[in-house]
Image (spheres, rainbow, N blue to C red):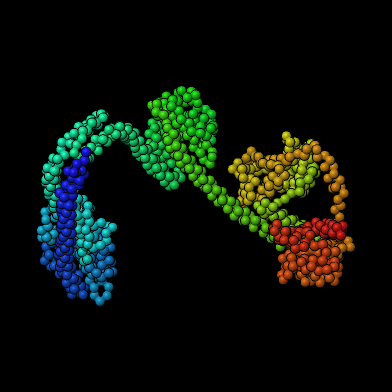
C-alpha cells in the first residue's frame, strides 16, 4: 500500500546521479581535452618553427659555400684561360675549407678539366653526374646536389655547383665536394630534445645528417623520415609515422635554396603523455566522486534496504525458476516488481528459449554471410581473370582452385570434351591422388559424369559406391582418391555441354543445395572462359582467312592484268599490220584467226568475271528443265576437241543412257563441262589422255572427268574450288587462266542441287573431277515428251529480211560493226551516234526495232527510250533492245523499267543478236 512518505527508487537514483556525478565528470573531461588540444597546437607550432630555424641555418651554411665558389669563379685566371693558375687559386680555396674534399672544374659540356685533390694534369675519371653539370651550365643557376660517396676520398660528400659566366652562356662549371660533417655539426648545434629524431634529407631522399644513430643512417634512404610524396607543400605536419619503432608526429620543412628537407619526428607518447596523465587524474577523481555518491546512496537508500532484501530473495527464487513471493513493502515499485515477478518467471523461460534459438540463427546467418562474402570475392577475382586472360588453361585451373576453397571439398576435377577421343577427359585437378586420369574416357550415359552429360542437370550423391548411377570403372578412381560424397555439375557453352566439374569429399559429408548453387556459378564462369577462348580462336581463324583471301585477290588481280594484256598485245600487233597492208593472203588469214581466238579468250574472261559477280551477289539464276546429259557432253567434248588435237591429247567418252535424264539448264551444264574439260586440257601434257564417263550412282547421274596431267598437290586440293585460288599463282606459272572456272563450276552444280569434288593421288599423277546431279523420276516421262515437242516446234531463224532497224551507239567502231552484222542478216540499218539523231531517224523512217547503248554523252539510252515511249504512233511502240557494257542486276532492272524489252551485255555474238531481234519483233507482232 502506498503511503504519504513513499518515494520511488527511480526518483532517488535519478536525483543522486544527476546531482553527484554527470555534470562533474562531463566538465572535467571537456576541460582536460581542451587543454590537451591547446598544448598539441602549441607543440605543432613550436616544431614547425624549430624546423624553419634549422632550414635557415642550413641555407646559411650552403650559401657560404656557394659564395666562396662564386668569388673563385670571378678569378682573372679564367678570363685569361689560364687553367694552371686557376688550379692554384682553387687549391688555396680548398685549403681554407677543411670540410671540403676537393674543388673541380668542368666544361659546359661536362668534361672534367681538373680536380684540386689531384696534381694538375693528372688523368681524371669522368664526372659521376655530368647531367647536373650540363643543367647548371644551361640554366646558369647554382645547384646543391645529393649525398654520395666521393670517388677519390671515399667519404660521404655532396656537390655544390656554380656556373662561370662571362657576358653570355656559362663557359665552365665550378664544383666543390663538401663532407656531411658540417651539416651534422649544424644539426647537433640545434640541441633537440633527446626523445626527438631530427634529420636533414637531400632532394633524392638520402639522409645527410641525423641526430640519433647518425653513422648507421647517413647516406642511406630516409625511409619514414622522408616527407610523404602526396603532400607537396614546403611545410607539413603528419601523424602516425613509424620512426625507430615509435609512432611519431613528423614535421618537415623544405629549403628553397637546396631543395633539401628538415624533418623532426616527435614520438606520439611524448606529445600525448600529458593527456593520458590528465585522463588518469580524471579517472581517479571520478572514482572518488563515485565513491562519495555511493556513500550518499547508502545513506539515502537505508530507508529502502529492507524491502530490497526481500525483493532480492524473490529475485533469487525467480532465478531458480521458482514462483517468487514478495510481502507488502512501503515502496510502491517493490510491490509492483513483486507482482510482476510471477509473470516474469514464465516469460523468462520463454525468452531464454527464444534467445538460444536466436543465437543459433545468428551464428548461422553470420557464417552464411561470411561464406557469401568470400564467395563474392572469389567470383569477382575469377571474373577479373576471365576478362584479363584468353588462356583457358589458366582460367580453368583458377576455377578449380576457387571451387576447392569455396566448397571446402577434398578434391576438384574439371573434365572437357575431347573430339579426338569422343569422350570427356579430365584436364584440371586439385587435391587428387589418382594418377591415371589421362587414360580415362568419360562417355555420355556412363557413370555420374556420363549421367550429367546426358541429362544436363547437376548430380549430388552421399555415397558414390551405393549410387546406382556409378560405374565399376569409376570405383577404381574413387577408391584411389578416397571419395565418399560427390557432386557433378555441367559446363555449358551456348547451351552445349562442353565439360563437367566434379567435387568430392573423403568423408560422408553431403553436398547441400547452396553448394550446388556455388558449383553451378563456378561452372558458368568456366563456360565463359571456354566461350572466350573459342571466340578468340574463331577470330584468329577469321583473321587468317581474311588475310589469305586478300593475298588471293591480289594475286588474282595480277593474273587478270596478265590475261587481259597478253591477248591485247597480239591483237594490237596484228591490227596494225593489217592496216599497213604488208601481209600476204596466208599471213592475213593467220591474223584474222589470231584476232578471233584472242577476242573469244577475252570474252570468256569477261563472262567468267560476270558470273563470279552474280555468284557473289547471289543473283546467278538457272532455267531448270528436263534434259539429256549425253547431248550436253557430246557438245562440250566437240567444243574442246580442236584444242585437244593440237596437243595430241585423246578424249574418250563412255556414257550410260540410264543416267542421262536430269533436270537442268543445258547452257549452264555445258559451261560446267567445258570448264572441266578446258581445265583438264590445260594441265595435261602432250600425248596425254582425258576420259569422260557418265554413269548412274544411286539416285544420281555421275559425270567423271579424268586426266593424266600434272595432278593436284595435297595442300591445294581442299581449296581447289575456292575463288581466286590457283595451285601456282607466281609470275612464272606454267598455265594461264584466272582461277575462276572451278569456282563457277561448284556454284552452278550446287544450283542444280548437285555436288562436285576433286580427287588426285598427288603431283604428276593426274586428277579426277566428279560431278553428281539428281536423276529425274519416272513420273516425268510425259513432261519430257512435251518438252521435246516444244523444242522441235521452236524455229531459230536468223533472217532479218524486210526489217528496218535503228542502231544507236556513241562509239563509231561498235556502231559500224553492228550495222554490218545486221545487214549481213538481211536487215535495213539506220545508224545514229546520239539520242537526238536516233529520234530523228525513227521519225524519218518508221523502224521495226531499236538497238541502243545506255551510256552516251548528253542524253543516255534511258532518256532516249522514255522519249520514244512517250510519243504517239509507231515510234512509241517500237521493239527496243538495250546493248550495254553495264552488267549489274540493278542496271538490267533499270533498263527494263525504262522501256526496253530486252537487255544484252557487250560483247554479243552477231548471230545471237539477230536471233534475239527476230524473236522480239515476232513477239511484239503476235501480242498486238
| Residue 772 visible in the picture | yes
| Residue 392 visible in the picture | no
Q: Residue at x 18, y 49 (%)?
A: 18
Residue 687: x percent and y percent?
A: 72, 43
Is 36 displayed left or right of 793 in the figure?
left
Marks counted in the figure total 0
**Closest to the observer, 239 or 154:** 239
Q: In which quarter of the image is the C terminus?
A: bottom right
Residue extending furthest toward the bottom = 167
Quadrant in which residue 874 is drawn: bottom right
Q: Quadrant of the N terminus?
A: top left
Residue 804: x percent and y percent?
A: 86, 65
Quadrant in which residue 710 is drawn: top right
Is 652 displayed left or right of 111 in the figure?
right
**Closest to the observer, 568 or 287:** 287
Residue 542: x percent and y percent?
A: 55, 48
Q: Residue at x 69, y 44 (%)?
A: 750
Residue extending furthest toward the right = 802
Q: Is residue 452 above or below residue 264?
A: above
Q: Is residue 20 above or below residue 810?
A: above
**Closest to the observer, 787 or 121:** 787
Is 631 displayed left or right of 401 in the figure?
right
Quadrant in which residue 64 is drawn: bottom left
Residue 580: x percent and y percent?
A: 75, 67
**Closest to the observer, 269 or 802:** 269
Q: Residue at x 79, y 71 (%)?
A: 837
Amino acid at each position: 500500500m502506498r503511503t504519504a512518505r513513499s518515494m520511488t527508487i527511480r526518483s532517488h537514483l535519478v536525483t543522486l546521479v544527476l546531482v553527484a556525478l554527470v555534470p562533474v565528470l562531463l566538465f572535467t573531461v571537456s576541460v582536460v581535452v581542451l587543454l590537451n588540444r591547446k598544448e598539441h597546437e602549441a607543440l605543432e607550432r613550436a616544431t614547425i618553427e624549430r624546423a624553419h630555424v634549422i632550414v635557415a641555418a642550413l641555407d646559411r651554411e650552403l650559401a657560404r659555400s656557394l659564395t666562396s665558389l662564386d668569388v673563385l669563379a670571378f678569378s682573372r685566371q679564367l678570363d685569361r684561360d689560364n687553367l694552371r693558375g686557376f688550379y692554384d687559386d682553387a687549391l688555396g680555396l680548398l685549403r681554407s675549407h677543411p670540410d671540403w674534399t676537393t674543388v673541380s672544374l668542368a666544361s659546359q659540356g661536362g668534361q672534367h678539366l681538373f680536380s684540386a685533390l689531384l696534381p694538375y694534369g693528372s688523368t681524371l675519371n669522368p664526372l659521376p653526374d655530368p647531367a647536373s653539370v650540363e643543367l647548371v651550365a644551361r640554366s646558369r643557376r647554382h645547384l646543391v646536389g645529393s649525398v654520395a660517396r666521393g670517388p677519390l676520398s671515399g667519404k660521404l660528400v655532396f656537390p655544390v655547383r656554380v656556373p662561370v659566366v662571362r657576358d653570355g652562356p656559362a663557359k665552365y662549371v665550378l664544383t666543390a665536394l663538401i663532407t656531411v660533417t658540417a651539416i651534422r655539426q649544424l644539426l647537433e648545434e640545434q640541441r633537440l630534445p633527446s626523445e626527438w629524431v631530427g634529420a636533414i634529407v637531400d632532394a633524392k631522399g638520402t639522409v645527410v645528417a641525423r641526430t640519433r644513430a647518425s653513422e648507421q643512417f647517413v647516406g642511406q634512404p630516409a625511409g619514414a623520415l622522408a616527407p610523404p610524396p602526396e603532400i607537396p607543400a614546403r611545410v607539413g605536419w603528419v601523424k602516425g609515422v613509424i620512426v625507430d619503432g615509435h609512432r611519431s608526429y613528423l614535421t618537415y620543412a623544405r629549403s628553397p635554396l637546396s631543395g633539401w628537407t628538415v624533418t623532426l619526428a616527435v614520438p606520439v607518447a611524448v606529445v600525448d603523455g600529458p593527456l593520458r596523465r590528465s585522463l588518469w587524474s580524471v579517472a581517479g577523481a571520478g572514482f572518488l566522486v563515485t565513491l562519495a555518491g555511493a556513500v550518499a546512496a547508502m545513506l539515502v537508500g537505508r530507508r529502502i534496504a529492507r524491502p530490497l532484501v526481500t525483493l532480492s530473495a524473490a529475485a533469487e527464487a525467480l532465478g531458480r525458476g521458482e514462483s517468487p513471493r514478495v510481502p507488502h513493502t512501503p515502496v510502491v515499485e517493490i510491490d509492483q516488481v513483486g507482482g510482476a515477478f510471477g509473470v516474469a518467471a514464465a516469460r523468462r523461460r520463454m525468452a531464454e528459449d527464444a534467445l538460444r534459438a536466436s543465437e543459433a540463427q545468428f551464428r548461422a546467418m553470420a557464417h552464411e554471410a561470411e561464406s557469401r562474402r568470400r564467395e563474392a570475392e572469389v567470383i569477382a577475382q575469377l571474373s577479373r581473370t576471365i576478362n584479363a586472360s584468353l588462356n583457358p588453361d589458366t582460367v580453368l585451373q583458377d576455377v578449380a582452385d576457387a571451387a576447392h576453397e569455396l566448397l571446402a571439398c577434398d578434391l576438384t576435377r574439371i573434365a572437357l570434351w575431347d573430339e579426338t577421343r569422343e569422350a570427356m577427359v579430365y584436364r584440371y585437378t586439385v587435391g587428387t591422388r589418382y594418377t591415371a586420369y589421362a587414360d580415362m574416357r568419360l562417355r555420355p550415359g556412363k557413370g555420374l559424369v556420363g549421367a550429367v552429360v546426358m541429362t544436363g542437370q547437376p548430380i549430388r550423391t552421399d555415397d558414390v559406391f551405393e549410387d546406382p548411377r556409378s560405374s565399376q570403372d569409376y570405383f577404381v578412381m574413387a577408391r584411389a582418391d578416397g571419395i565418399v560424397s560427390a557432386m557433378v555439375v555441367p559446363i555449358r557453352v551456348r547451351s552445349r555441354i562442353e565439360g563437367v566439374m566434379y567435387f568430392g569429399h573423403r568423408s560422408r559429408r553431403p553436398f547441400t543445395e547452396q553448394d550446388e548453387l556455388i558449383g553451378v556459378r563456378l561452372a558458368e564462369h568456366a563456360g565463359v572462359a571456354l566461350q572466350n577462348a573459342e571466340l578468340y580462336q574463331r577470330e584468329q581463324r577469321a583473321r587468317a582467312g581474311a588475310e589469305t583471301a586478300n593475298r588471293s585477290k591480289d594475286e588474282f588481280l595480277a593474273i587478270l592484268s596478265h590475261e587481259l594484256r597478253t591477248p591485247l598485245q597480239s591483237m594490237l600487233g596484228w591490227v596494225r599490220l593489217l592496216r599497213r597492208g604488208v601481209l600476204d593472203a596466208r599471213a592475213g588469214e593467220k591474223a584474222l584467226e589470231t584476232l578471233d581466238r584472242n577476242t573469244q579468250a577475252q570474252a570468256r574472261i569477261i563472262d567468267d568475271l560476270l558470273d563470279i559477280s552474280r555468284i557473289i551477289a547471289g543473283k546467278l539464276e538457272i532455267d531448270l528443265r528436263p534434259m539429256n546429259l549425253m547431248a550436253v557432253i557430246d557438245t562440250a567434248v566437240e567444243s574442246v576437241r580442236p584444242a585437244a588435237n593440237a596437243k595430241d591429247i585423246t578424249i574418250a567418252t563412255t556414257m550410260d543412257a540410264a543416267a542421262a535424264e536430269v533436270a537442268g539448264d543445258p547452257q549452264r551444264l555445258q559451261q560446267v563441262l567445258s570448264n572441266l574439260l578446258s581445265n583438264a586440257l590445260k594441265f595435261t601434257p602432250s600425248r596425254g589422255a582425258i576420259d569422260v564417263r557418265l554413269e548412274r550412282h544411286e539416285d544420281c547421274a555421275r559425270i567423271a572427268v579424268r586426266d593424266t596431267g600434272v595432278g593436284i598437290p595435297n595442300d591445294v586440293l581442299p581449296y581447289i574450288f575456292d575463288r581466286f585460288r590457283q595451285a601456282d599463282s607466281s609470275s612464272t606459272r606454267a598455265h594461264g587462266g584466272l582461277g575462276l572456272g572451278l569456282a563457277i563450276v561448284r556454284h552452278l552444280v550446287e544450283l542444280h542441287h548437285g555436288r562436285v569434288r576433286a580427287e588426285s593421288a598427288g603431283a604428276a599423277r593426274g586428277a579426277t573431277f566428279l560431278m553428281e546431279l539428281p536423276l529425274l523420276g519416272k513420273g516425268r516421262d510425259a513432261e519430257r515428251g512435251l518438252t521435246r515437242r516444244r523444242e522441235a516446234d521452236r524455229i531459230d531463224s536468223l533472217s532479218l529480211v524486210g526489217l528496218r532497224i535503228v542502231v544507236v551507239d556513241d562509239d563509231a567502231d561498235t556502231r559500224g560493226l553492228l550495222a554490218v552484222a545486221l545487214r549481213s542478216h538481211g536487215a535495213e540499218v539506220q545508224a545514229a551516234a546520239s539520242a537526238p539523231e536516233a529520234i530523228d531517224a525513227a521519225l524519218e523512217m518508221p523502224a521495226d526495232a531499236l538497238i541502243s547503248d545506255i551510256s552516251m554523252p548528253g542524253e543516255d539510252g534511258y532518256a532516249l527510250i522514255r522519249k520514244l515511249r512517250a510519243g504517239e504512233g509507231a515510234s512509241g511502240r517500237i521493239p527496243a533492245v538495250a546493248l550495254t557494257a553495264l552488267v549489274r542486276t540493278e542496271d538490267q532492272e533499270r533498263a527494263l523499267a525504262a522501256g526496253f524489252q530486252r537487255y544484252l551485255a557487250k560483247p554479243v555474238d552477231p548471230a545471237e543478236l539477230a536471233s534475239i531481234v527476230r524473236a522480239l519483233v515476232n513477239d511484239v507482232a503476235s501480242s498486238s
